Image (tube, rainbow, N blue to C red):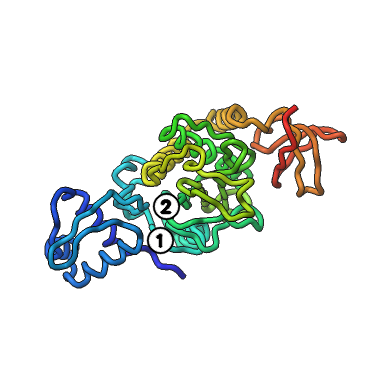
């Protein structure tokens, strides 16, 4: 079991950021966070281990050389005021974890509130759909899972995956307007035909209502290379643009975007249809594209948009079929 990152690390970062141009003594830090100087030294070493560039030592004091790009609660919470993810206490950060989705599902079952966010610098067992794994390089991507408790039947769960895809697309467009991500049903986002983001929605439900839903988002942000088996199919924002991106900025934009989509879904009766329409408009492959689907006994045909629940319709030689789940392989556009 991996334990959450010590909350005092974020408090030290905030303190050093608010005194950016001066050296802060170990004594002052110790007073501010309520601990001893020797413990401050130990925590600074931990921050350095996380890749934070802190100059100085116990005798002279400490100073940040650069704003760290760590997804710590203190770094994100100020941007999230007014959203369901808005409290620093709702954001749980891990240096290393098996999977943020597994941790979120476990916490949700124990009563963690809606709007709880789980973030990791590195996942050791990142999960995709089915038996797929998700390659999670340390501090290069965003590995994020959120707990939602919508009052809806489990048959509506797919709409949350589609809404999350739209939220990622909007967040990327906000920080990198030159990138127009392509949505691939049901839960991948592509740039130049290669995948840079995957979404995994899991739920615990009774027959007629969802108890809790966990939406997991994995985004390749600053990776510069991938393992050989992924090179042909995976990409990152950095590979596509040649620029390094702030994960903190993108993660804040993502959570704000998710908050907007979620609120409209639970408050506005017309939001479902709007999500289906926007998903279709943002995807090059849900209409008029030749695809094959391995599961469901296997089928091939031409896509004909989404049905009213968000499932993919495919026109096959035997007639119109609805794909409820499965990996869609794009053969080509007509």
Residue at the outermost right position: 318
User: Residue at the spot x=28%, y=49% of the render?
Assistant: 67
Q: Quadrant of residue 205?
A: bottom right
Q: How many residues crowd around disc 2 within 10 Å: few (fewer than 14), some, or many (20 or more)? A: many
Q: CA distance from mark 1 to mark 2?
A: 11 Å
User: Residue at the spot x=29%, y=44% of the render?
Assistant: 78
In the rendered structure, the answer to whether residue 325 lies left or right of residue 238 reads: right
Which type of secondary structure does the marked residue at label 1 adopt? strand
Q: Residue 141: x and y, percent?
A: 46, 50
Which numbered marker is on residue 94? 1
In the rendered structure, the answer to whether residue 12 lies left or right of residue 249 reads: left
Disc nearest the viewer among 1 and 2: 1
User: Residue at the spot x=80%, y=35% of the render?
Assistant: 301
Q: Nearer the viewer, residue 111 or 23?
A: 23
Q: Is residue 287 above or below residue 217?
A: above
Q: Which residue is mark 2?
A: 117
> Is residue 199 shown to the viewer in this render?
yes
Q: Is residue 225 above or below residue 39?
A: above
Q: How many marks?
A: 2
Which type of secondary structure does the marked residue at label 2 adopt? strand
The reply to whether dot 1 and dot 2 touch (C-beta < 8 Å) is no
Q: Nearer the viewer, residue 268 or 67?
A: 67
In the rendered structure, the answer to whether residue 317 lies left or right of residue 253 reads: right
Which numbered marker is on residue 31? none
User: Residue at the spot x=57%, y=57% of the render?
Assistant: 127
Give the mark nearest the N terminus, 1 or 2: 1
Q: Residue 305: x and y, percent?
A: 69, 30
In the rendered structure, the answer to whether residue 20 lies left or right of residue 109 reads: left
Q: Quadrant of residue 40?
A: bottom left
Give the quarter of the figure containing the C terminus.
Answer: top right
Q: Is residue 99 above or below residue 195?
A: below
């Amino acid at each position: 079991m991996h334990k959450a990152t010590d909350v005092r690390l974020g408090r030290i970062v905030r303190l050093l950021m608010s005194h950016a141009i001066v050296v802060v003594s170990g004594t002052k830090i110790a007073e501010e966070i309520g601990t001893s100087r020797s413990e401050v030294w130990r925590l600074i070493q931990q921050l350095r281990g996380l890749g934070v560039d802190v100059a100085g030592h116990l005798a002279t004091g400490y100073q940040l050389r650069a704003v760290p790009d760590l997804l710590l609660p203190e770094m994100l919470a100020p941007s999230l005021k007014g959203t369901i993810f808005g409290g620093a206490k709702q954001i749980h950060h891990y240096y290393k974890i098996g999977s943020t989705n597994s941790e979120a599902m476990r916490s949700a079952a124990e009563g963690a509130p809606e709007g709880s966010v789980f973030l990791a610098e590195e996942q050791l067992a990142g999960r995709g759909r089915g038996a797929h794994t998700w390659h999670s390089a340390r501090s290069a991507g965003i590995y994020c899972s959120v707990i939602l408790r919508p009052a809806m039947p489990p048959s509506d769960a797919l709409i949350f995956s589609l809404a999350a895809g739209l939220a990622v697309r909007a967040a990327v467009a906000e920080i990198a307007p030159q990138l127009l991500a392509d949505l691939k049903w049901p839960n991948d986002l592509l740039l130049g035909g290669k995948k840079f983001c995957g979404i995994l929605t899991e739920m615990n439900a009774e027959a007629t209502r969802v108890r809790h839903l966990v939406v997991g988002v994995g985004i390749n942000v600053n990776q510069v290379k991938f393992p050989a088996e992924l090179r042909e199919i995976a990409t990152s924002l950095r590979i596509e643009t040649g620029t390094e991106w702030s994960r903190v900025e993108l993660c804040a934009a993502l959570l704000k975007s998710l908050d907007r989509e979620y609120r409209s879904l639970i408050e506005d009766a017309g939001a479902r249809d709007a999500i289906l329409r926007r998903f279709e408009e943002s995807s090059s492959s849900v209409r008029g594209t030749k695809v094959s689907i391995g599961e469901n006994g296997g089928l091939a045909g031409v896509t004909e948009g989404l049905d009213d629940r968000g499932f993919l319709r495919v026109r096959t030689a035997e007639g119109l079929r609805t794909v409820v789940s499965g990996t869609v392989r794009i053969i080509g556009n007509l």
